[in-house]
Amino acid sequence: MLEGDVALRWQVLRDLGGAGEGERARVGVEGVGARLLALQGDDGAWGGVAWNRGWDSTMHVLMLLWELGLDPESEQARRAVGLVREKVTWRGAGPEESGGNGFFEGEVEPCINGQVAAVGAYFGVDVRGLVDRLLGEQLGDGGWNCEAENGATRSSFNTTICVLEALLEWEKTGGAAPEVTEARLRGQEYLLKRRLFRRSTGEVIERDRKGGADWTRFAFPTWWHYDVLRGLEYLRSAGVTPDERVADAIKLVASKRDGDGRWALETSYPGTMPVELGETVGEPSRWITLRALRVLDWYPQRG
């Protein structure tokens, strides 16, 4: 894994090797991170828009830079995010009523706003307005659903994970508040009660209703899609003490390790990638392997 992109190298050293901060500065000037930054237009946007149905829009590139771990204090990050804040709006990329909103004001769907709030918090932007909106949209079962405006009363794993990551990022970057933590813990409990991939009846969810994705097959990037590994990564990042409710999910992850100790990229989602990451579906994946090893290290070994 240390032979992969510099963004992956520094995370491997940080999370599995106990070092790596010196490598982080390279993410904005080498490899995938630098290539992504170079694609930003003079209008501050990637792909010319705040959001699109592919993966090459402003929101998606910022999400990927967040996943890569671009240092938010770096000159490259400050310049790129400053241009987005100053110039990018939701005109032509969301509902008409949101067209005049600045990028970090978001639009109307909690899954999209969760992703915007997550990257905004990570890169040091004040997104408290979006956080407050998300708190007000939490459903009675503890999660969130983009279809709530159309009458949905049950939460969606896809939407919930996007919002949970946003609330956690907001707390980690200095925005902790009791009402935010309380909402996040309720949403977290929604996932745990369902053991990360089961219905309330206990039945394994084989396909999600919205996109038809199989939550037991791992992708990177995940974009708005939920999968079991993403759920476990959130719990690890949140410092949750694992209990028996994650045991099935951990067993699933461990079962996918090949004879060389690696995990494959099992799926990818249709859409235009801003840059290719150099990984092929069905082949061993450095990113999936890193993420799997992180959650296995987090989970205590049971005798």
Image: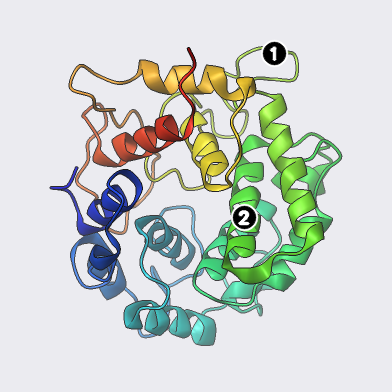
Residue at the (38%, 47%) spot, across then down? 271
Count all numbered tags in the image, as a single digit: 2
Is residue 144 visible in the rendered image? The answer is no
| Relative height, residue 186 to residue 85 (above, below) | above
Q: Amino acid at mark 2?
A: Leu
The nearer-to-camera label among 1 and 2 is 2
Is there a contact, CB below 8 Å, between mark 1 and mark 2? no
Element on which disc 2 rests: helix
In the image: residue 75, left or right of residue 196: left
Above or below — where is 225 with respect to 94? Answer: above
Q: Decide: is 59 above or below 291.
A: below
Q: What's the residue type where badge 1 is placed?
A: Gly
Q: Which of pointers 1 and 2 lies earlier in the amino acid sequence? A: 2
Check disc 1 and report the residue beneath it.
202
Task: Say left or right for 287 vs 260.
Answer: right
Q: Could you give the CA–CA distance between mark 1 and mark 2, rounded to whole angstroms? A: 27 Å
Q: Tell me the residue that label 2 is attached to.
A: 168
- Residue at 74% across / 54% down in the picture? 181
The x and y percentages for residue 177 are 76, 64
Please name the residue shown 53% across and 28% down the image. Answer: 212
Classify 1 as above or below 197: below
Task: Please say whether residue 251 is visible from this viewpoint.
Answer: yes
| Classed neighbour count for the residue bearing mark 2: other residues with Cα under 10 Å, few (<14), some (14–19), many (≥20) | many
Residue placed most toward the observer, 74 or 277? 74
Label 1 Cα crowd, 10 Å radius (few <14 / some 14-19 / many 20+): few
Res 243 quadrant in image:
top right
Q: Position of residue 259 (x, y in %)?
A: 20, 16
Q: Quadrant of the N terminus?
A: top left
Q: Is residue 201 left or right of residue 8?
A: right
Residue at the spot x=44%, y=43% of the render? Answer: 222
- Camera-side residue: 122 or 130? 122
**Left or right: 57, with 113 as reference point:** left
